[in-house]
């Protein structure tokens, strides 16, 4: 998991060992987050725009499965301006997973978040400082609460309301 340091930043054996321990601790935190997400993804309610995004995901599936003949997704609300990668992934996952549409969206959201944190934690090494900072960020994101779906819709809704004022 830990990348070798760039040649210009040679780490001592002790610093490399500490960096590996910090990387291992970050993985433990990510694993704990994955376990909690897997245990709780069915327990969250709907956000104010969940139906809209779910519908957009279905329109994207129709766009691609029709060979771009069904163009409804290209003018749906204003979501075509944001990109629909997550909505498409969630719509496809809902077709194969045994959960309801919104439960699947929560599970996919947690998976995307955990994978994103893993990729950020495993970014190219800048020595022990990178390992310490990545561990701190993973711990903060997971335990502060911004990671969990019930917080996402509240935070987005508050931001949306403030931007309209």
Image: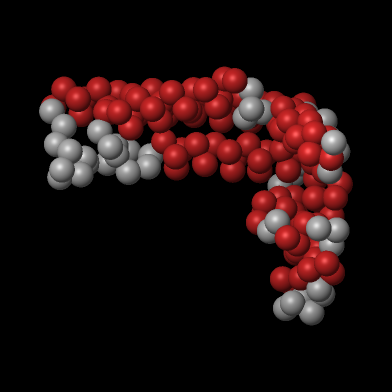
Residue 94 is situated, as x and y percent measured from the top left of the image, at: 75, 50
Q: Which of the image's four quarters has the N terminus?
A: top left
Residue 70 is situated, as x and y percent measured from the top left of the image, at: 82, 75
Residue 155 is situated, as x and y percent measured from the top left of the image, at: 73, 30
The residue furthest front is 165
Q: Is residue 117 left or right of residue 122?
A: right
Please identify the quarter of the rendering in which residue 18 is found.
top left
Q: Is residue 46 above or below residue 54?
A: above
Q: Which of the image's four quarters has the C terminus?
A: top right
Q: Is residue 64 left or right of residue 53?
A: left
Please identify the quarter of the rendering in which residue 38 is found.
top right
Please tell me which residue lies in front, 164 or 48.
164
Question: Which residue shows up at 59% across the image and 43% down it?
Answer: 112
Q: Is residue 69 above or below residue 142?
A: below
Q: Is residue 93 visible?
A: no
Please identify the quarter of the rendering in which residue 126 is found.
top left
Please tell me which residue lies in front, 124 or 95.
124
Question: Which residue shows up at 48% across the image and 28% down it?
Answer: 138
Question: Which residue shows up at 83% across the image and 67% down it?
Answer: 75
Question: Which residue shows up at 22% across the image and 41% down it?
Answer: 4
Residue 161 is situated, as x and y percent measured from the top left of the image, at: 83, 35
Q: Is residue 142 visible?
A: yes
Total label count?
A: 0
Q: Is residue 119 left or right of residue 42?
A: left
């Amino acid at each position: 998991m830990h990348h070798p340091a760039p040649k210009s930043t040679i780490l001592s054996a002790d610093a490399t060992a500490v960096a590996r321990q910090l990387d291992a601790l970050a993985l433990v935190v990510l694993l704990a987050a994955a376990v909690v997400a897997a245990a709780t993804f069915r327990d969250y309610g709907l956000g104010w725009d969940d139906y809209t995004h779910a519908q957009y995901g279905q329109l994207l599936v129709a766009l691609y499965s029709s060979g771009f003949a069904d163009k409804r997704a290209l003018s749906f609300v204003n979501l075509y301006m944001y990109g629909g990668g997550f909505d498409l992934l969630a719509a496809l996952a809902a077709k194969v997973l045994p959960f309801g549409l919104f439960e699947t969206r929560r599970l996919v959201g947690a998976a995307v978040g955990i994978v994103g944190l893993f990729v950020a934690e495993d970014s190219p090494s800048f020595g022990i400082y990178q390992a310490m900072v990545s561990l701190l960020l993973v711990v903060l994101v997971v335990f502060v609460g911004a990671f969990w779906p019930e917080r996402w819709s509240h935070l987005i809704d508050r931001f949306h309301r403030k931007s309209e004022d």
